[in-house]
């Protein structure tokens, strides 16, 4: 049990003893970590919340609770603050107990989820015949981290790369394959070759509208099952997936399924007919649309928009007048499949914030259909250049994700060569990959996902500040301590920590909070909480290391400090691992 959970139980018992039947049924006081340690380690404002309901002065009620807690709460000193806050100062001895418990626990105190769920996470989702670009970083890295965290918490997680492998662009690619494709270039760099073919055909179509008709005819043949076009399409998908898997391998990201848009093609027509038969959808100007059913207030209705002071309909189109289906149709079919075949309790879509209205409409259509489920749009902002515009190359092209990875590793290699010129080449390459890839991931995950952020090479690879290299270097520094010990000189299982110095107590305090932080990252899908915690832990370790000699100390003090170092290394490695970042033993 985490410290807040333990204190919450004790506060609840105190309220129950004081208020008896007056205590509202199901009331659960919230205990949270203090933002300012001058006021204690944890705090609770339950007395101020309850006081009005039970017609008592909040400070007087808080005083009674504190009095009751002082008789029963051995691990903390409760105090009253302000109009009725209850603050807790945790005893150093209790933090030492927590340390001893963590030393023998592979999970380092992190509890499993009380109610494990089956969660499908939809992320990355690039398009076939196009290279991944910097815009895919956020979905790919955030989605993978959420999957790692959810699995660690005991949930059953299914990851699905819902690639764009169907649609109008394939008419152009099919025509280009037959008329423009250079097979030698395709063998050397399939994705770039297919992209260049698509761009060339797109340009030609603008110059000659008749060619666009031919491309549409190729698409119709594909959708009709033409053997030649199906064969070309399958080759495009296979070549693209092979190229994508190389990038995912570099990022150490893996998917359980690659069920693209094409997988659901046969389900679209029956889905539209079902919506029409149930009266959820109707024909409007030849298209099949879903309109508002009046369930929400206009301000919260995703099918309405306010124009000139009037609420006007913004329907979800699920079949165009020409018979073509849209993303909305595919996404509804995808939801059906995931619920039926994966038994999903929850489905998370890690997709950019501009798709907010789209997902609100999709989820609301599911409500209209009577489909129950926890559907989440895990939205995120944009990656910007220093000019605060979308990050581009100097010639205005979208930055390739492969180029970002390569550049990160090259820059990390230069840093490592400066610090450790005598390191063997193979080890240098391995560590450069850890540092470079880790820097890109941490730069992403340390941000509030809803905020835009500036892509800054120098900042993300710095050995100081809120960066992966700083945390990796902190881990290396801790590990170097243990390399100086004789075999058997430190045994974690035999350690009985005793904390006395302020720097020791503060580091132990932060180590104990790891068990609180990891579960909280899934509350609103916020990996930045874990990233910020790990940075704060590393800073606390450096302060401790400067203030409290480790190897020069002796006896129980030395064992305690080695235990603090041991736990710091383990928390840093496990925590960064949950963010998908490897920790080198040397740098």
Image (cartoon, rainbow, N blue to C red):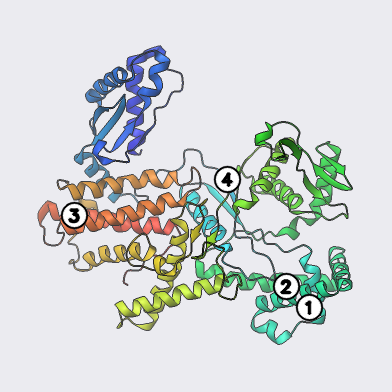
| In the image, residue 327 above or below residue 482 | above
Density class for disc 2 (Cα within 10 Å; few <14, some 14-19, many ≥20) is: many
Rounded to the nearest angstrom, the CA distance separating label 3 from label 4 is 41 Å
Q: Earlier in the sequence, mark 2 or mark 1?
A: 1
Callout in the foreground (3, 4) = 3
Q: Earlier in the sequence, mark 1 or mark 4?
A: 4
Circle 3 — which element? Answer: helix
Q: Which residue is mark 4?
A: 118
Looking at the picture, tell me which residue is in the foreground, 23 or 1. 23
Q: Quadrant of the C terminus?
A: bottom left
Callout in the foreground (1, 3) = 1
Q: Position of residue 121 (x, y in %)?
A: 59, 52
Callout in the foreground (1, 4) = 1
| In the image, residue 195 above or below residue 535 | below
Callout in the foreground (2, 1) = 1
Determine contact: label 2, label 1, CB under 8 Å. Answer: yes
**474 displayed left or right of 252:** left
Q: Earlier in the sequence, mark 3 or mark 4?
A: 4
Q: Which residue is mark 1?
A: 177
Rounded to the nearest angstrom, the CA distance separating label 4 from label 2 is 32 Å
Q: Position of residue 277 (x, y in %)?
A: 86, 38
Q: Which residue is mark 3?
A: 561
Circle 1 — which element? Answer: helix
């Amino acid at each position: 049990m985490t410290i807040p959970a333990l204190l919450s139980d004790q506060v609840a018992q105190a309220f129950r003893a004081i208020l008896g039947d007056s205590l509202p049924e199901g009331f659960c006081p919230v205990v949270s970590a203090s933002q300012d340690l001058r006021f204690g380690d944890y705090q609770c404002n339950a007395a101020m919340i309850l006081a009005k309901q039970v017609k008592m002065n909040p400070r007087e009620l808080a005083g009674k609770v504190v009095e009751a807690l002082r008789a029963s709460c051995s691990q903390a000193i409760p105090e009253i603050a302000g109009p009725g806050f209850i603050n807790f100062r945790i005893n150093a001895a209790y933090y030492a107990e927590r340390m001893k418990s963590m030393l023998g626990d592979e999970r380092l105190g992190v509890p499993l989820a009380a109610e494990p769920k089956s969660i499908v996470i939809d992320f990355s989702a690039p398009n076939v015949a196009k290279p991944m670009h910097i815009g895919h970083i956020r979905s790919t890295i955030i989605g993978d981290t959420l999957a790692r965290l959810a699995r660690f918490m005991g949930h059953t997680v299914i990851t699905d790369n819902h690639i764009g492998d169907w649609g109008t662009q394939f008419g152009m690619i099919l025509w280009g394959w037959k008329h423009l494709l250079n097979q030698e270039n395709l063998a050397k760099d399939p994705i770039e070759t297919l992209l260049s073919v698509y761009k060339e055909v797109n340009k030609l179509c603008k110059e000659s509208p008749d060619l666009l008709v031919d491309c549409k005819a190729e698409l119709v043949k594909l959708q009709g099952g033409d053997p030649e076009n199906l064969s070309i399409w399958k080759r495009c998908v296979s070549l693209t997936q092979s190229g994508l898997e190389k990038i995912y391998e570099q990022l150490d990201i893996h998917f359980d399924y690659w069920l693209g848009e094409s997988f659901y093609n046969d389900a679209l027509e029956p889905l539209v007919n079902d919506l029409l038969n149930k009266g959820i959808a109707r024909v409007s100007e030849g298209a099949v649309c879903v309109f508002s059913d009046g369930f929400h207030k206009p301000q919260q209705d995703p099918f309405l928009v306010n124009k000139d002071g009037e609420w006007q309909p913004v329907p979800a189109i699920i079949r165009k007048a020409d018979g073509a289906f849209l993303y909305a149709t595919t996404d509804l079919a995808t939801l059906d499949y995931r619920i039926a075949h994966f038994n999903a309790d929850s489905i998370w879509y890690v997709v950019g914030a501009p798709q907010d209205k789209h997902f609100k409409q999709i989820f609301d259509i599911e409500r209209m259909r009577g489909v129950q489920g926890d559907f989440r749009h895990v939205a995120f902002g944009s990656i910007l250049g220093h000019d605060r515009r979308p990050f581009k190359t100097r010639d205005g092209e979208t930055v390739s994700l492969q180029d970002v990875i390569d550049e990160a590793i090259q820059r990390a290699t230069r840093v490592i060569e400066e610090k450790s010129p005598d390191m063997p080449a193979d080890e240098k390459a391995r560590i450069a990959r850890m540092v470079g890839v880790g820097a890109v991931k941490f730069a992403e995950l340390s941000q509030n996902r809803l905020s835009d952020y500036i892509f800054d090479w120098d900042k993300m690879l710095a050995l100081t500040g809120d960066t992966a290299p700083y945390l990796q270097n902190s881990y290396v520094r801790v590990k170097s301590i243990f390399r100086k010990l004789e075999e058997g000189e430190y045994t974690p299982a035999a350690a009985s920590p005793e904390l006395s110095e302020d720097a020791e107590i503060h580091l132990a305090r932060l180590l104990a909070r790891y068990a609180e932080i990891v579960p909280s990252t899934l509350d609103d899908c916020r990996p930045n909480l874990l990233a910020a915690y790990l940075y704060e832990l590393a800073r606390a370790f450096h302060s401790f290391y400067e203030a409290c000699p480790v190897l020069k100390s002796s006896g129980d003090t030395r064992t305690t400090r080695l235990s603090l170092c041991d736990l710091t290394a383990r928390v840093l490695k496990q925590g960064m691992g949950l963010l998908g970042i490897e920790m080198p033993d040397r740098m």
